[in-house]
Image: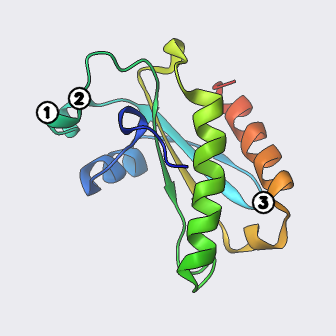
Amino acid sequence: MVLPKEMRLKGYKCFDYIHKSSKRYNSPSMTLRVSRANQNLISPDRTHPCNQSCRCAISISNKVSKKAVIRNRLRRLVHSHLKIRLFKKSKHINKWALLSFKPRCLDKKPKLLLEECDKLLLEAGFC
């Protein structure tokens, strides 16, 4: 399942902003970057006045797996998990999050990956 439109981050400007002005939280198989929202970087057609949740993005490089099927499966797994955890949490409106996976993430089972994701979200103050 995909994240709702009001929770998605798109565009290279948003990703550059997060890389430059974010706080990092690391774990063995993923990195979470959290920064303040910058509404000027989002195109006007994507801004929703009723947005009551933070915006998220997931980055999975070819180093994790050369097969797009595996990367997409991992992305769908984490998208559904983030949707459950962060959708309609009004205290996180002004935050953007970027979750990047490391190559060793495929060694772990999905349940352990989601627990690790929860641990990072808790450390960052999302849960």
Q: Position of residue 45 (x, y in %)?
A: 15, 35
Residue 69's quadrant in the figure?
bottom right
Within 10 Å of the Cα at label 3, are there few (<14), some (14-19), or many (20+) other Cα atoms?
Answer: few
Dot 1 crowding, Cα within 10 Å, few <14, some 14–19, many 20+: few
Q: Which residue is mark 1?
A: 44
Dot 1 amino acid type: Pro
Q: Is residue 33 left or right of residue 37?
A: right
Residue at the extreme bottom: 66
Disc 2 is placed on an element classified as loop
Give the Cα separation between the discs numbered 3 and 1. 37 Å
Question: Which callout, 3 or 1, points to the residue nearer the camera?
Answer: 1
Residues at marks 3 and 1 touching, judged by CB atoms closer than 8 Å: no
Residue ID for mark 2:
47
Q: Of label 3 and label 2, which has the lower sequence position?
A: 3
Identify which amino acid the numbered label 2 is placed on. Answer: Thr
Image side of residue 15 versus residue 41, left or right: right
Judged from the image, the secondary structure of the residue bearing numbered disc 1 is helix
The residue drawn where x is 39% and y is 42% is: 8
Contact? badges 2 and 1 (CB < 8 Å)? yes
Toward the left, the furthest residue is 44
Q: Earlier in the sequence, mark 3 or mark 1?
A: 3
Question: Residue 28 bears which disc, if any?
Answer: 3
Q: Secondary structure at mark 3?
A: loop
Identify whether 74 is placed above or below 19: below
| Count of picture labels | 3
In the displayed structure image, the side of residue 6 where residue 3 appears, left or right: right
